[in-house]
Image (tube, helix red, strand yellow):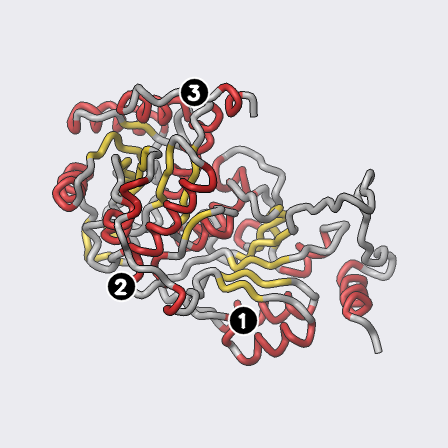
Amino acid sequence: METKSETVDTIRRTIRGAQAPPLTRIKPAGLTSGRQITASPTAVVYCEGNFAQIDGKTANGLVRHSQAYRILSVIDSTYSGQDSGTVLDNVSNNIPIFGHLDAAVAHEAMFPDTLIYGMAPSTGRLSKADRGVVLKAIELGMNIVSGLHEYLSDDREIAKAASERNVTIRDIRKPKPSKDMRLFDGSVAGVKALRIAVLGTDCAIGKRTTATVLARALNAKGIKTVLVGTGQTGLMQGAKFGVAMDAVPPQFCCGELEGAIVAASEVEQPDVILIEGQGALSHPAFCTSAFILRGSQPDAVILQHAPKRAHRCDFPNMPMPSSASEIALIEAFADTKVIGVTLNHEGMFDAEITDTIAAQSQKLGLPVTDALARPAAHLLAMVIAAYPGLTQRPSMAAI
């Protein structure tokens, strides 16, 4: 009987051809018996038909930033043969796109550890075609990571296949038992770090991306910053603190987020804690923004807005709100202030971005920028202007 590694090696050679070398595990140079070196697991991101689109936001986020996994490639036959960074941001990142799983696996010298389901469909469920890809990945010996509302570890067929191949299924949105969840107790008020929530006027609008760019900029400046994730993509990317808010029973949402923020404060002792937003406070289909404002009690908010988006994502009969109306709602709902606006430039030319930044800034009386299309220094300046007392830590600046 073949072992798991022998079975995987057989499949791999079938995909790549008879001359493909066997699957091997390489011991890193310099590894001694007293010190174990571990590398981030490798991953292929499945995003068929949705990469660089709204429903592909998980894949989009992972190719832009990932600490938990080393992203090898993306699967989307629409862009097969292209570079994912060029497709997404017009800047090459050397993460190729393949048309199917076999091609992605065959491309690698070492067998990928993980298949990540990189889509966030409005149904929150696995399609028949996607199920086939997941089962094929398991057959090949790959672990599975999913952010769907449908828990793959509870699926009998998928769970059975995973058990037989001795691979793991990680359901990002699967909450812990309610007996282990915490209620809000007000301890967030004792957190000394400046708390900034990045909210938006819609879902899938770039809140997490803006928060990630800002965290990098602040840390590079020597202002120690921790990002608390509140959605599946941020947790997949490797957020050390956070909770998938839309998978937690409402009565525990504020307490669970508060707990993540308090833990980040106690463990990291940062100057700034950024809280990733979800949905929009004004969006009737989502309640997570309300829980985020209540649970984090933020000192400030940065608002993400897409000026060219005519209607809410997945709701064609629901017009987008203005940035001004969302700001008014946020500041009426919570004891906080909006310190700036960041743009999602979908559907905009560069000149339009420049004009919109100027127009929005004049209209709102706030700094406005675009986290991806403009230098990160502009985003950093937005925070420093509101909180000039933030000080640089020399030890962090050297990192």
Residue located beneath label 3 in the image: 392
- Specify the amino acid type for callout 2: Gln
Q: For mark 1, does the 10 Å Cα neighbourhood hold few (<14), some (14 to 19), or many (20 or more) residues?
A: some
Image point 25% across, 52% down: which residue?
A: 312
Q: Residue at x 75, y 52 (%)?
A: 110
Q: Residues within 10 Å of mark 3 (few under 14, many from 20)?
A: some
- Along the viewing direction, whichever of 13 and 6 lies nearer the viewer: 6
Q: Label 3 to label 1, Cα distance in Å?
A: 49 Å
Give the residue number, with chain letter if any, for mark 1.
Answer: 131
List x then y, in percent, for residue 357.
Answer: 27, 26
- For residue 328, which quarter of the picture? top left
Q: Nearer the viewer, mark 2 or mark 1?
A: 2
Which element type, helix, strand or loop, lies under badge 2? helix
Q: Nearer the viewer, residue 393 or 279?
A: 393
Describe the element under mark 3 as helix, strand or loop: loop
Count the labels in the image: 3
| Residue picked out by circle 2 | 251
Q: Viewed as shown, does residue 286 lie left or right of 226?
A: left
Dot 2 alpha-carbon crowd within 10 angstroms: few under 14, some 14 to 19, many 20 or more: some
Q: Residue at x 40, y 65 (%)?
A: 180
Q: Earlier in the sequence, mark 3 or mark 2?
A: 2
Identify residue type, mark 1: Arg
